[in-house]
Amino acid sequence: MKDISLVFISLSISIISFTQYNTQWYYPSTLNTTPAGYIGIGTKNNLGTANTPLPAFNLHLHGTADFITNDDLSGMKPIDADNNGVAAPILKALLNYGKTTRLGLTNSTTGLTQTDGAVFQMSENNLSIKNQESGSITLSAPNIALTLSSATKRIWVGGTQTTAVDFARFNVYTSDNGMFIQTVGTAKYGLRIRSKVGTDAVQVYNEAGTTKNFKVTSDGMVFARKYTTTLSAIPDYVFSPTYVLMPLDELKSFLEINRHLPNVPSAKEYEEKGVDLGEMNRVLLEKVEELTLYIIQLEERIKIIENSEK
């Protein structure tokens, strides 16, 4: 009985010294005004050890050692006398994550090894959350959920998951606006898409998902059912009594010198800056309206000539 008591006392002292506490801390203690009930793993009471950290949270995991992976096997050593005739694993180059705290979650389905279950890991200044099983990770709040799905190899926000090939790696289901992207500063992209040659970079279908109403190909081709632009200066000003229509002889001279219509950018300008479709349509309408005035002028001259010959 005495031996059992000694073992129990020794075990208790080990736990208190090196693992966890849930009692009041001696001074100096945590910054919390009521430290009672705090549990620290990797921390200990700092009586006589001023530099040893105490729990700063209700549950505090504190890592002080490097985490070095050693479970990545690339083959087996030959059987020899050194390992008693048993093939030993050959390890790949080890990876040191630095000072690390790791919290593992396993169950009777995942198993108990280092590569099982889920891992919350703080290495140096880097935090990672990893599901090591062929399942998913879900972050959720009422009415919204974000799921990283191993089965579909996709990220889902809302909606039902599916393995259909027409879904992208990132999918958003919503009953209101799909996504909102805003950038601040220069040289920033609100949305940047890169796709394979010969494929569509953007596709927009009708509500039923049966008709493709809009698409942009990787080659820069845009297809749409209808294009609408708003212009602040529709060229009906051409028909204003104050509008000055260039005389035909001046127009002829202008064309001979410039090789393009007045108020119309040159071919070189279009090549360098591209074509604004809305502005191009405005300019074309302006020229059509000017042509209409020229035709009316010519018609009046023809009538004068015809009347003079009678």
Image: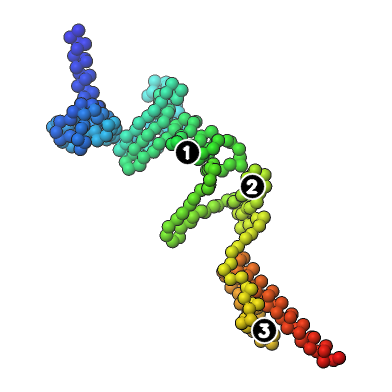
> Do the residues under discs 1 and 3 have CB atoms within 8 angstroms?
no
Viewer-nearest of discs 1 and 3: 1
Q: Which residue is mark 3?
A: 251
187 up-or-down from 300: above or below = above
Q: The residue tagged with tag 3: helix, strand or loop? A: helix
Identify which residue, 303 or 16, lies in the foreground. Answer: 303
Query: Considering the image in quadrants, where does the C terminus appear?
Result: bottom right
Q: Are marks 2 and 1 in contact (CB under 8 Å)?
A: no
Q: Secondary structure at mark 2?
A: loop
Distance between mark 2 and mark 3 Cα atoms: 48 Å
Question: From the viewer's perspective, is residue 215 above or below residue 19?
Answer: below
Residue 206: which disc? 2
* Side (left or right) of 276 relative to 140: right
Rendered residue at 18%/37% (across/down): 51
User: Residue 144: which numbered mark, if any?
Assistant: 1
- Tell me the quadrant of the picture where the N terminus can be found: top left
Q: Is residue 177 above or below residue 112?
A: below
Labels 2 and 1: the sequence-earlier one: 1
